[in-house]
Amino acid sequence: MSAKQEYDVQTLLTHGGIQPDQHHGFVNTPIYRGSTVVFPSAEAFREGRQKYQYGRWGNPSTDALTSAIKALEGAEGTVLCPSGLAACSTAILALMEAGDHILIPDNVYSPVRTLCDSLQNRFNFEVTYYDPTLGADIESLVKPNTKVIYTESPGSLTMEVQDIPAIVRVARTHGAFTITDNTWGTPLFFPAIEHGIDLSVMAATKYIVGHSDAMLGTISASPRAWDKIKSFHALTGIFASPDDVTLALRGLRTLHVRLERHQRNAIAVGKWLEQRSEVKSVFYPALESHPQHNLWKRDFKGASGLLSFVTREAPQACVDKLVDSLKLFSIGYSWGGFESLVLPATLQSIRTAKPWEEPGHLIRLHVGLEDADDLIRDLEEALNEFSKNLK
Ligand SMILES: *Cc1c(COP(=O)(O)O)cnc(C)c1O
């Protein structure tokens, strides 16, 4: 399947990467595990005259996923990485050179911040963390050596939505590349390449795999960034396991159905949380109370299942109890699987461009595919208990 425009996204998800005629009629591409691929003759070997030549350079399993994601993203090309973080780091390293400047949003997935802090010293990268609500005003931070403007929208934990079209215009004017971490929206809800982004990164670990049973990252490129990412990816030997890739292909088939339900449940949970006196604010772009709700409405086609809320001021022990008493939301990292998760977060030590001075506690929820009323009842019991403990 080729150009994205030809089919609706739901059709792409169903048919992307499927080639039964290449696999004896089997609907799904088998798992091709392997390093060595044998050649029929010395001449064929010398001339590299066959489609697959060595495991690391790709196989029918990895090709099935790259072609499906490429079509979905409307990209010039897609490469796979063994984790979402590997996709973020590979995207940055493919574009940056020693002495270059990169702009990173203050609410970036925090391991990317740790990475950039380390690269700053070791590879002589200049890094500036910026307020993610800047939009076109980001131009004031652009320097002659700015090579990359990195975005993540909505950003981690505090969920600010960025004005990506405005940022892309600034980057274009100054000859810089743009990267976006599109894990939350996926191309279903935010077609990043269409919005002018050069490298669209996803932690496929989250919604693409969708079942919390594998780790994977994807990088999809605009025509102007494709050669850079393709060659750097090949140079560094980054490779995704065919087993994990096959799980991602399975997840992909139901992505639109799952995202619709995550959205419906998250809206129900978010609206309910807003009404509670124990909750000071809810950070979820689909709610009208969200500071960038209008930007989200302009640029996004939907909202996924991740949201955060801030509790009233309370002793840490009360917040711990609230989190511990939830039965359907398990405590843990990551998100995007079928199940609900909760993560208590501390931001005070992380943010620099826009210090976090909120005295309440931030709690992140991944709203899963359970019954929304069951989830709300679980939260209700926990918040009632929280109220009682506060008195
Ligand atoms: C989880 C996450 C990543 C990293 O993905 P892993 O597969 O866990 O390495 C990157 N970006 C965002 C926004 C994430 O939420």
Image: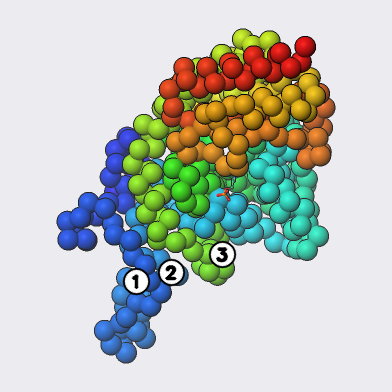
The residues tagged by marks 3 and 2 sit, at their Cα atoms, a distance apart of: 13 Å
Q: Position of residue 161 (x, y in %)?
A: 62, 29
Q: Which residue is mark 1?
A: 52
- Give 22 or 35, whichever is nearer the viewer: 35
Residue visible at 29% across and 38% down in the picture: 11
Residue visible at 63% across and 55% down in the picture: 89
State left or right for residue 60 relative to residue 91.
Answer: left
Q: Position of residue 232 (x, y in %)?
A: 56, 64
SS type, badge 1: loop
The residues tagged by marks 1 and 2 sit, at their Cα atoms, a distance apart of: 8 Å
Amino acid at dot 1: Tyr
Q: Quadrant of the C terminus?
A: top right
In the image, residue 34 sits, relative to residue 326, either above or below, namely below
**Is there a contact, CB below 8 Å, between mark 1 and mark 2?**
yes
Q: Which disc number belongs to residue 57?
A: 2
Amino acid at dot 3: Phe
State left or right for residue 369 relative to residue 167.
Answer: left
**Is there a contact, CB below 8 Å, between mark 3 and mark 2?**
no
SS type, badge 2: helix
Q: Which disc number belongs to residue 255?
A: none
> How many other residues sit within 10 Å of disc 1, few (<14), some (14-19) or many (≥20)?
some
First reached walking from the N terminus: tag 1 or tag 3: 1
In the image, residue 26 sits, relative to residue 343, either above or below, namely below
